[in-house]
Image (cartoon, rainbow, N blue to C red):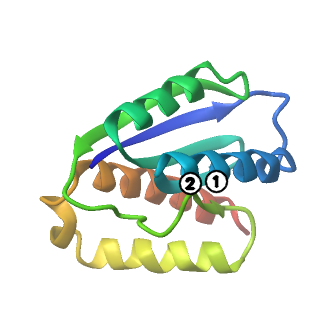
Amino acid sequence: MFCLVYRSVASSTFKQVDVKEMLEKARENNSRDNITGCLLYYEGEFIQYLEGNQVKVLTLFDKINADKRHKDVTLLAYDVTDSREFKDWEMAYADFFGDNDQMNYFKLLINSYNENPDSTTNQNPSFNAFWIAVRENLDKTLKSQP
């Protein structure tokens, strides 16, 4: 199983309402290609974890890199792992804006990760890179709230 994590910035024309359309298409394509993962979006920045067949994931990453809705695409990590982290999710999604069920779920996951980081440290470095990037955005979110 191949996995990768990237961060990108949404283009100036990309709006919050565009996420729904993008997710619907991504879920359809990912289901077809047996790719799973998680997409996080906050204040114009994406963090995404993708996992599946290496050729298919890298092909998808090339498409993402060429997609005009993204800029400054930065590969944070990639690796080969024994199992999926998001095995039942064609594309999990959380918006860091406001208090919602998905955000609460990610807060719980991050708290669990922060309390016991050694439990995952040697399993999947890409998954660790994903949570580090998520934690950075969550910290930024919490600091900006009154």
Instruction: Provide the secondary structure element on which disc 1 rests.
Output: helix
Coordinates of residue 83 in the picture (x, y in percent): 25, 61
Say whether residue 114 is left or right of residue 108. Answer: left
Which residue is rendered at x = 59% and y = 79% of the image?
A: 104
Q: Nearer the viewer, residue 144 or 103?
A: 103
Quick check: marks 2 and 1 in contact, CB under 8 Å? yes
Which residue is rendered at x = 56% and y = 49% of the image?
A: 32
Coordinates of residue 90 in the picture (x, y in percent): 55, 59
Which residue is labeled 1 in the image? 27
Q: Nearer the viewer, residue 131 or 90?
A: 90
Check the image and name the residue furthest to the front: 32
Which residue is labeled 2 in the image? 31
Which residue is rendered at x = 52% and y = 65% of the image?
A: 89
Coordinates of residue 40 in the picture (x, y in percent): 59, 54
Q: Residues within 10 Å of mark 1 (few under 14, many from 20)?
A: some
Three-letter residue code for mark 2: Ser
